[in-house]
Amino acid sequence: SHFGSSHFGRRFPGFRLCQPPFERAPFLVPFTAMPPKDAAAKAKADAKGKAKAKAKAEKQEEEKDRVQAPDRAAFEEELAKIQEVIDGFQKEQQTLAEKIRERSGGKEEFFAQKAELRAQLDEFSAKIDALMERKGDVNKAIGDKRQEGIDMKQQLNKMKKSIGYTSEQEIDERIASIEFKLWTDTITLKEEKTYLKEIAELKKNRPKVSQVNKMEESVQNRDYGAGFKEQIGNINEELALYRDGKRKVQEKLSALMESRKEQMGDLPTIIEKRDGIGKKIAEKVAERNALRDDFRAKEREFNQYLAEQRKARQEKA
């Protein structure tokens, strides 16, 4: 007969009854179940391992997000280097400024003399301009006078041409000659009309001859600007005096400028060098300010990180 499983378990602890597929006698198989104490120890060990793994993972995550404190020593060292360069530039600039002050001596006196000479030149220029304006007006008047004479001559020639005779006597002789012809010659009616028309025209032009003669006399005795020429001569004399005075003042101004140039020497080069150093100082100051701003930004970031860490610890507590 077969053993019952419950009876078998009590008789043989640690084994269980196994029934093969064929009706054979049952045989014993070792039972793998752990004792209660071992299972509890294993569960405790697993929990402890998981806790350690979790703590390790949290620590790694914390290290990953950790914000490093800014290196103040390195910052101050870099700042000192920049300041050393700035101090060197400023010392060099001060030396150049001293040279500029030495060569700029007498500046007020120079500018005062220069202004006085400039004022004299302006005064001479104003007088010359006024005379040139007067001269222009006189030349215009001369030109107008000349043109008026030309117009009178043209009108005179035109009147002479229209009359055809230079004296009243010539006209009278022509009239007498035509009348004699009319009395003595046999002529046609058409010719008679032509002669009578010519006599009428001659009588009409006879008074104009005296006008032409008077006009011709007026043209011949006309003043074509002798008075104006005298004015031009006087103006030219004054212009020569003012121009000579202006030239002398200009020579004084040139001598003053040349003297000042010798005194200054290579001052423009020194000023240019000083200004160049000033630009370099400005660049270094900007670099120093940028370094400070960067360090302060890192400080703010680190302080914010510390505040967040304190808050996280307080929430866990």
Image (cartoon, rainbow, N blue to C red):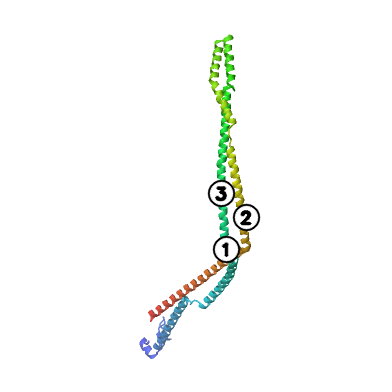
Q: Which residue is mark 2?
A: 251
Nearer-N-terminus badge (1/3): 1
Q: Which residue is mark 1?
A: 107
At label 1, the amino acid type is Lys
Quarter of the picture containing the C terminus is bottom left
* Residue ranking furthest to the bottom: 11
The residue located at (45%, 74%) in the rendering is 300
Q: Are marks 2 and 1 in contact (CB under 8 Å)?
A: no
Nearer-N-terminus badge (2/3): 3
Residue 125 in the image: state x and y as whole percent.
57, 50
Q: Which residue is mark 3?
A: 127
75 or 106: nearer the eye? 106
Q: Secondary structure at mark 1?
A: helix
Residue 142 sits in which quadrant? top right
Task: From this view, report whether residue 118 is shown above or below residue 279.
Answer: above
Circle 2 crowding by C-alpha within 10 Å: few under 14, some 14–19, many from 20 = few
| Residue 136 visible in the snapshot | yes
The residue located at (62%, 53%) in the rendering is 248
